[in-house]
Image: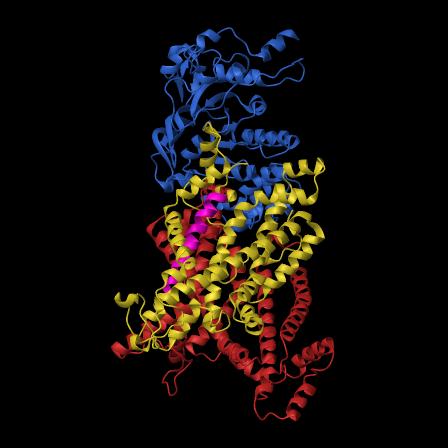
Chain colours: A red, B yellow, C blue
Amino acid sequence: MLIFVVRRLLYSIPVLIITSFLIFWAVTVSGDPLTTVRQIPRVSQDTINSIIERNHLLEPFLIQYWEWVKSAFTDGFGTTLLGDAPIFPDIRRVLGNTLQLIVAAEILSVILAAIIGVVSAVRQYSTFDYTATTFSFLGFATPTFFLALLLQILFTNLYLSTDVRIFYTSGLSSAGADNFLIDRLQHLALPVITLAVLGIAQFSRYVRASMLEVVNSDYVRTAKAKGVKKRNVVMKHALRNALIPFVTAIALDFGGLFGGAIVTETIFGIDGMGRYLVGHLNTRDVYPVMAWLMITSVIVIMFNLIADVIYGYLDPRIRYD
Amino acid sequence: MTNPNPSASEHLPAAPQVDRPAPETTPGLDADELTSFHEEGLEVVARSQWQLARRRFFRHKLAVGSLVVLMIIVFVGVFAEQIAPYSFREQAPLDARMAPTLEGQHYFGTDVLGRDYFSRTVFGIRTSLYVAGIVALLSTLIGSLYGAVSGYFGGWIDNLMMRFVDLVLTLPILAVLIVIAALLGNGTPIRVAVILALFYWTTLARIIRGNFLSLREKEYVEAAKASGASDMRIIFRHMLPNSMGPIVVNATLIVATAILVEATLSFLGFGVQPPEPALGKLIDDARGFMQSMPWLVMAPGVTIVVIVLCINFVGDGLRDALDPTQRRLRA
Amino acid sequence: MLSIRHSGDFVPEPVLSIRDLVVDFATDDGVVHAVDGVSYDVHAGETLGVVGESGSGKSVTVMSILGLIPTPPGKVTRGEAFFKGVDLLKVRDRELRDIRGKDIAMIFQDPMTSLNPVFTVGEQIGEAIEVHDPSVKEESARARAIELLQLVGVPNAERRVDQYPHEYSGGMRQRAMIAMSIANEPSLLIADEPTTALDVTIQAQILEVMKKAQIETNAATIMITHDLGIIAEMADRVAVMYAGHIVEVGDVDTIFHRPRHPYTLGLMNSLPRLEADERWLKPIPGQPPSMINVPPGCPFHPRCELSREREICRTEFPLLESLESSQHKSACHFKHELAGETSKFVEEEAAS
């Protein structure tokens, strides 16, 4: 088991390196990073020169890459081009906020999807199953931003008509709130729901299909033939096998959630990774963008690794490779 | 024999944010015992594969209904010029802020500048379909070839090629798409389509490669090799036609994904940009007036939902009809 | 308790007695009568071989008795299955569950997929014991599992008991399945194509293990297979099934040497023999019938050489009736015409 983990870890390193290279290359290749800076009136040539100097922009590509990688470890990815703000502290702050959002959404998705999926499979073709299927299809067809906007409209109207704030439609917290936790929950609720809906739609189908496959398998038939109680057949034999791929699906989905977060944060005005990225993309400020991509990739690769390890733990068949 | 170093991701279908994973079991013949008893006992009437597939497809009323709706929508998109009463950017300040009405053919109402939202939606549909179509085409072409080569040759070639696919898929797709679109995009539908295709070919590559890996072992491939057929010939004449089912099904799903992603990109301002029409942009424009004129957000949004829903239903029906693995028929 | 039949045949009370069982499946194309009026008995200590082609209903019969067929789309429309006096088809789920794995045990075809890949073999054998006796402790269950594995001939049982199914070979897995089935000393053992998924060389070994298991438990055994060789090896009595019906039943000697149904005769004659100098094989022409729209009359008549298109074969369904001995029955209008006919196995013996 340990060897398995170490092997996966070692494998991740070249992946990280190649990813960093790809990110750097793709972004640099897209054009002169100083385009926006040059367009600012009254920017002196000196400022421009010092930026060029500091970021090694005149040197060969590989040196630039190396300097960038160095800056990641020593200097927190350096500073932004415009405004000269240090990148890392900002990213750390927004990452924290986004992680709250993403983790909450994932937990909600997983729990609801597991329940819905299992029940749908066990009661195949029942009303519940058809209703769940309908919601799933709707969930797949609705773009995240549209759902977010609909929720905003709905809850704003609720507030306007009843004067009661159930959930907030923007921001992460209100100044002077009595209970920090409740306030935060009220602010997070809508974005989390938005993100979770797609996850639930997707995962419930996945769990359902997985369970159906398992429930019709030969070893479940054997368990029944042995006299095992129906409940145990489902919970012990079927579920464990069905959940193995599900668990890894969850871990792998984190990458997708970052994308969804971009949209959600923009609409709900949350000071998170999404807004950070969009903001700097709009100003074509490449350094924070590269840092963003790199950090996100690290997180995603980390989750992939966790997924592999969990899979190895749950499924004895691949453990002894 | 399983790959000695399976990455967990290999046990899963690739799942871009809005795609659907895994095998879907469908209503109808499910129990294996049932299938074996039923099929073995029947005197089989010879029918061509396509006829069987078509019959199965048309049994799905939902898929057929969705196909009809889709065709109407495609028609609307293609003949946008003729159907839309106004142009995309035409402003009429006197008719501003109208709720949906039959008056003046403003079925979806007008915004603050008096732009007719029905027309704008119609043109937006055209763009979306155009982009999605190109994405599907490119992804299918690239993905199929890539997967075919990888699956056919197997061994270290396959390993290497799939590692690359894995790499692409480890990145958060939407985020990367946004970045690339922001930095390299120029707002034209074509470029957006190409950028999207740069990522979505991977789903098809995976599937085709898996397909080819198993097809490789089939007798007719060995027979073809034994009779001296070249690799190219085997791939194109024997194996690809047998992979048509999964190809078509996945291409359909890619269309659905592409529509959603294109809309998201144009909503954020990084996708298709003015002067080209885009559904996402319509919603973004209307966002500031969401409370007073919610229909401006709803109309294009519901349009997107309907299109994608129909595509998904059709895709489901196609999967039922074409993908033999789901039926668990005996070989 | 003995029940006296005519002709002085003494037959003990059967362990399992199936009476007129009808099992239907609802499909998109219509209702399939997978089992269409099947009756047979099995007695303690004997092995009943149930032989037939795929689709003849031999598996569905036993699966439906144990409540193992999915009930939509399957349904037991009619019939009784008396196991030690209790009608399994009328009994409540709970009681059926108690019987499954304890009094009646089943061995399935494919041992790779029939064992759960995420639990050790020992855990799964132990489960069979623990489910029926909750007071059993883990250690004793494990010890018993080791005992059973040794009984069925799994080498190195103390180590193997903690291994996973994928670490076993095909033959070993089937041995483990057999061990699991006899764990609670069942009175009835049902084996559904137990060796079909295994290599021929392993088959013989597994059959040996099964014979041993049967001796150990004195269980009644139903051996379901399409392989006549296994029947010859293992069965005391044979029931031949076709299209959801029993067409002939009798002891193994009679069935092989003096079959009295054209289908059985056809089966025997279609087997190739190593010793004889045969130039052509003699298969039974035609295909099994559609189980949805069953034509009237005998289900076998389109392929039957004996029938010669006679009216009654097309219109009237032949019932399973006794021949000279009540232990030998055949469902054919013209079974008497086969009297005196012997299958080629007998000819060959006469010749040698």
Q: Is residue A250 above or below residue B208?
A: below
Q: Quadrant of the C terminus of chain A?
A: bottom right
| Residue C313 lies in quadrant | top left
- Main secondary structure type of the part rendered in magenta: helix
Q: Residue furthest front?
A: B82
Q: Quadrant of the N terminus of chain A?
A: bottom right
The image shows residue C204 at horizontal and vertical percentages of 63, 29
Q: Find out whether residue C232 is within the magenta segment.
A: no
- The structure residue drawn at horizontal position 45% and vertical position 71%, both measured from the top left corner, is B267
- The structure residue drawn at horizontal position 58% and vertical position 83%, both measured from the top left corner, is A36
Residue B147 lies left or right of residue C313; in this view the side is right
Camera-side residue of C5 and A135: A135
- The structure residue drawn at horizontal position 40% and vertical position 54%, both measured from the top left corner, is B70
Camera-side residue of C340 and A102: A102
| Residue C282 lies in quadrant | top right
* Number of numbered discs visible in the structure rendering: 0
Q: Is residue A116 visible?
A: no
Q: Is residue B125 above or below residue A72?
A: above
In the image, the segment drawn in magenta is B302-322
Q: Find out whether residue B309 is within the magenta segment.
A: yes
Residue C32 lies left or right of residue A160; in this view the side is right
Camera-side residue of B34 and C87: B34
Q: Is residue B306 visible?
A: yes
The image shows residue C73 at horizontal and vertical percentages of 38, 38
Q: Is residue B235 above or below residue A9?
A: above
Residue A26 lies left or right of residue A213; in this view the side is right
- The structure residue drawn at horizontal position 59% and vertical position 54%, both measured from the top left corner, is B141
The image shows residue A283 at horizontal and vertical percentages of 54, 81
The image shows residue C49 at horizontal and vertical percentages of 51, 24
